[in-house]
Image: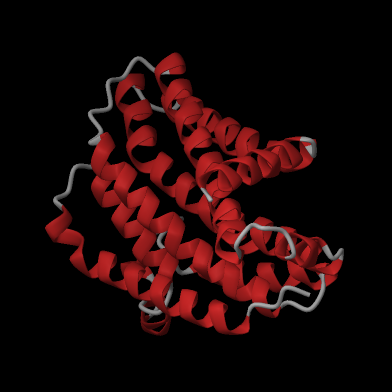
Amino acid sequence: MLRGLWNLTWLEIKIFLREPLGAIGTIVVPVLLFVLLGRVAAARDAAPELAAGGVIRAGVPALVSMLIAVSAVLSLVTVISIYREGGILKRLRATPLRPATILIAHVLVKLLLTAATMAIMMAAGKRYYAVGADVPVFGFSLALLLTTWSILSIGFVIASVVPTARFAQPVGAIILYPMLAVSGLFFPLRILPDWMQAAARFNPLAYSVSLLQGTWQGDAWSAHLGDVAALVLVFAACTAVSARVFRWE
């Protein structure tokens, strides 16, 4: 099983990298945006080191959260829909690989792409800004893993019900953009109207942003038990739903 999982994961990575636009949108664009924001912040501040450090501390978690959301709700939904419509899922299911192996391979691809983008962002920060961001890497990595699994489970629910690849992008966008608007990515939730704050309580991405930013800044996990519980609940619920409604053909 492990050998089949590795081979399928490696195959999916190679297929993804053969499409330049996908790699550019997933990896290159977030890194360029991170570097650009950091340079602009440094240019506008009398103390460039502090400005750059602020971008590294506040910008990276937000960008990672956005990357997770885009990968889960758009990229994953589109890939699964194309595979189903083209009969690829049906053929894969007929192989000795178990259905769970096939689905886990897609999740691993997204996790690896997220990790690669994160590593490049960190390298870019050290390359362009003379700062030493004391980030608890292990704790943040666990938060990133939990967030990724949770948001990807939402993507699988959408992929389970989207009828064709033609509808994948529009349906994903309809779900993604409202989630981003009330997630705390762009401005604090406390300044939003009451009804939007209420909506944010049902938005998994809001808990993701809170957990990632908190662990990145060194908060104890005990301060984010609510975020963790919400993301675990989302993962469990979406996994159960997708297991029931997922269509292989």
Relative to 63, say whether 171 is above or below. Answer: below
Among the 4 quarters of the image, the one containing residue 19: top right
- In this image, 231 relative to 109: left or right? left
Relative to 17, say whether 146 is above or below. Answer: below
Figure quadrant of the C terminus? bottom right
Residue 206 shows in the view: yes
Relative to 138, say whether 161 is above or below. Answer: below
- In this image, 228 relative to 165: left or right? left
Q: Nearer the viewer, residue 61 or 156?
A: 156
Residue at 75% over, 69% down: 168
Residue at 79% over, 35% down: 18
Residue at 48% over, 45% down: 63
Among the 4 quarters of the image, the one containing residue 191: bottom left
Relative to 243, say whether 99 is above or below. Answer: above
- In this image, 13 relative to 21: left or right? left
Q: Nearer the viewer, residue 71 or 128?
A: 71
**How far across and how far down the image is residue 53, in percent?**
32, 29
Residue at 51% over, 53% down: 68
Among the 4 quarters of the image, the one containing residue 92: bottom right
Residue 188 shows in the view: no
**How far across and how far down the image is residue 241, in percent?**
52, 82
**How far across and how far down the image is residue 217, in percent?**
23, 42
